[in-house]
Image (tube, rainbow, N blue to C red):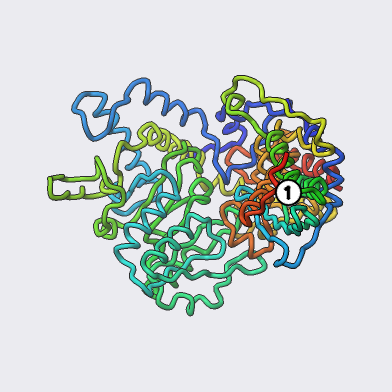
């Protein structure tokens, strides 16, 4: 049985109570992109200042539950100052962390274990997968970030 | 004679025997869906074990019996809501949402033209908003809204002007978010005076108070079986026989025709014109059982009991938590149902519901398919607790205990 402490880790509550990178950036030049969770009415606006393939600044506004707010706050801290390639890699790693395979929905098999060592405090969100209805809360910010990069055709250098 | 005892209903409801996270379940989500008592479940099981066949087709014994089950539910429903012309006025749908879609796409498309107005209210469920927007986009009708006041009641001060040019006033008997019960008879009388027909969303009322469509004097009446102790997958649209006869078919296919040839088709007469394809049959057996069960309890008794529960809960919510828990809805039980939308200061409804789940408490977080209403009160969501005929003050006890934990955790 999933325990509430797995979900509401202290670091998550900390980001919820004291969210990082709240605010707005003038758009343009910043990229502005909106994300919605139609299930619970959460709304998120992400502002991205990208210069020479680097995410120089990121700001967030909107409202949501503790999981979506903490996830977006932790995301902003994790990707700020990173190259677009690094940002995209971080998005992929996080999505993998949140993946519940169909086999587990079927009642068979275990979800693959993501490599937590490279994830820093984001690893605290791993407990969310034990509460499947909350996964969408945790991924909202990441999907919105990914959408923002895609919509504006932001390319990395492609070098690995 | 009715002998209503909520403890007895509890014993009759198998799902209430569940233990969730080590606690007996505290089911406070009856506004989403009510829990079926054993007679409803057994009626459906008995149907599948003894009588299952397709309806309106075979001449063999079980096919006749299956048809009797299906049409018997239509007759029981007609009696339950006091349909003046009986079962010929009762159309089975999938749910309240489909009833409204049928209303919009059949009656609406045939009777409304560009510039005509459909009036709804700001407290409607999306089921009574989106079909009209779809019709607006298709035909150019206007969709108008009766505003909601700060005290969570409809603002009817400007109703005469709002009703100008209105062909249909479609509104809810009871808000699924606020609990507000609207003055159906009064609103209907005013709408009729302006030459408008009236459609009532009764999803939140049929299982909680007596229903009489003649007394209400409405023209269309929509509800779902699963919100009155019945099964999911079955809804009802009632309308007067003369209106129903004039409405064009909705979905096309088997069962809804009188004849089909290579050059066209002739629709069936009566309610079956709107019931294309094999309908939910076992569910109608469940609906009949639910009606009998509710009538055995007495809808007026249920209303009185839920009023008491609501009054008690409102009082206790106001006295505890130092004002950190706000009820989004009327604060007294006058014209109010047992729906308590909660806004907990500093705690998102999703988190409230998550903490409550640890106590086995089932509430619904979210916008409750009423986003215009949520925007009206600057809310993204609420955590909604709602009562049913099996609810007890002990459910409120656990709710308050769990709310206390949520308040502390996020303080």
Q: Residue at x 20, y 45 (%)?
A: B257
Identify whether B278 is placed above or below A111: below
Identify whether B117 is placed above or below B47: below
Q: Nearer the viewer, residue A75 or B296?
A: A75
Label 1 Cα crowd, 10 Å radius (few <14 / some 14-19 / many 20+)? many
In percent of width and height, residue B106 lies at 32, 57
Q: Residue at x 67, y 51 (%)?
A: A155
Q: Nearer the viewer, residue B354 or B400?
A: B354
**What chain does badge 1 belong to?**
A
In percent of width and height, residue B224 lies at 45, 45
Quarter of the image containing the N terminus of chain A? Answer: top right
Q: Residue at x 69, y 50 (%)?
A: A145
In percent of width and height, residue A159 lies at 72, 42
For residue B383, side relative to residue B135 (left or right): right
On the image, numbered disc 1 is attached to which residue?
Answer: A84
Judging from the image, what secondary structure is the residue with disc 1 in? Answer: helix
Quarter of the image containing the C terminus of chain A? Answer: top right
For residue B371, side relative to residue B203 (left or right): right
Q: Most extreme residue toward the left, as rendered?
A: B262
In percent of width and height, residue A33 lies at 66, 58
Residue A153 visible here: yes
Q: Residue at x 67, y 68 (%)?
A: B150
Q: Nearer the viewer, residue B253 or B15?
A: B253
Identify whether B81 is placed above or below B39: below
Residue B320 visible here: no
Count of numbered tags: 1
For residue B385, side relative to residue B204 (left or right): right
Q: Nearer the viewer, residue B176 or A69?
A: A69
Identify whether B159 is placed above or below A72: below
């Amino acid at each position: 049985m999933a325990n509430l402490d797995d979900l509401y880790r202290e670091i998550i509550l900390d980001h919820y109570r004291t969210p990082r990178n709240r605010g707005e950036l003038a758009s343009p030049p910043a990229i502005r992109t909106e994300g919605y969770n139609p299930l619970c009415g959460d709304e998120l606006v992400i502002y991205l200042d990208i210069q020479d393939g680097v995410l120089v600044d990121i700001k967030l506004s909107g409202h949501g539950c503790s999981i979506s707010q903490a996830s977006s706050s932790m995301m902003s801290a994790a990707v700020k100052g990173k190259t677009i390639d690094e940002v995209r890699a971080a998005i992929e790693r996080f999505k993998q962390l949140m993946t519940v395979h169909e086999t587990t929905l079927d009642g068979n098999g275990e979800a693959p274990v993501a490599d937590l060592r490279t994830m820093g405090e984001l690893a605290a969100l791993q407990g969310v997968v034990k509460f499947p209805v909350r996964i969408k809360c945790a991924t909202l910010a990441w999907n919105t970030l990914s959408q923002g990069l895609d919509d504006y055709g932001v390319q990395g250098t492609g070098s690995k | 004679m009715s002998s209503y005892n909520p403890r007895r209903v509890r014993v009759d409801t198998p799902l209430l025997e569940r233990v969730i996270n080590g606690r007996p379940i505290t089911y406070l989500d009856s506004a989403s869906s009510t829990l079926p008592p054993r007679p409803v479940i057994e009626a459906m099981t008995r149907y599948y074990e003894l009588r299952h066949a397709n309806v309106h087709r075979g001449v063999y014994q079980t096919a006749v019996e299956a048809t009797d089950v299906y049409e018997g539910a239509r007759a029981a429903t007609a009696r339950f809501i006091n349909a003046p012309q009986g079962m010929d006025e009762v159309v089975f749908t999938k749910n309240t949402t489909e009833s409204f879609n049928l209303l919009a796409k059949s009656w609406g498309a045939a009777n409304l033209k560009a510039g005509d107005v459909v009036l709804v209210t700001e407290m409607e469920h999306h089921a009574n908003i989106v079909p009209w927007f779809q019709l607006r986009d298709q035909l150019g009708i206007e969709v108008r809204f009766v505003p909601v006041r700060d005290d969570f009641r409809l603002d009817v001060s400007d109703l005469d002007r709002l009703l100008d040019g209105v062909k249909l006033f479609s509104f809810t008997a009871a808000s699924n978010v606020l609990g507000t019960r609207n003055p159906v008879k009064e609103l209907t009388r005013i709408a009729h005076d302006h030459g408008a027909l009236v459609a009532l969303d009764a999803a939140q009322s049929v299982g909680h108070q007596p229903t009489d469509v003649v007394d209400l004097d409405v023209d269309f009446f929509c509800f779902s079986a699963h919100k009155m102790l019945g099964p999911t997958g079955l809804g009802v649209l009632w309308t007067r026989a003369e209106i129903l006869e004039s409405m064009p078919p909705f979905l096309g296919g088997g069962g809804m025709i009188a004849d089909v040839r290579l050059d066209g088709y002739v629709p069936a007469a009566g309610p079956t014109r709107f019931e294309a394809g094999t309908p939910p049959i076992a569910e109608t057996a469940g609906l009949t059982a639910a009606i009998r069960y509710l009538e055995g309890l007495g809808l007026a008794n249920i209303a009185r009991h839920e009023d008491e529960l609501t009054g008690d809960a409102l009082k206790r919510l106001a006295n505890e938590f130092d004002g950190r828990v706000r009820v989004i809805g009327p604060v007294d039980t006058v014209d109010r149902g047992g729906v308590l939308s909660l806004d907990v200061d500093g705690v998102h409804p999703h988190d409230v519901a998550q903490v409550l789940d640890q106590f086995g408490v089932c509430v619904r977080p979210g916008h409750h398919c009423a986003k215009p209403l949520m925007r009206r009160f600057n809310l993204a969501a609420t955590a909604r607790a709602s009562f049913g005929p099996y609810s007890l003050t002990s459910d409120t006890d656990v709710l308050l205990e769990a709310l206390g934990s949520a308040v502390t955790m996020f303080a």
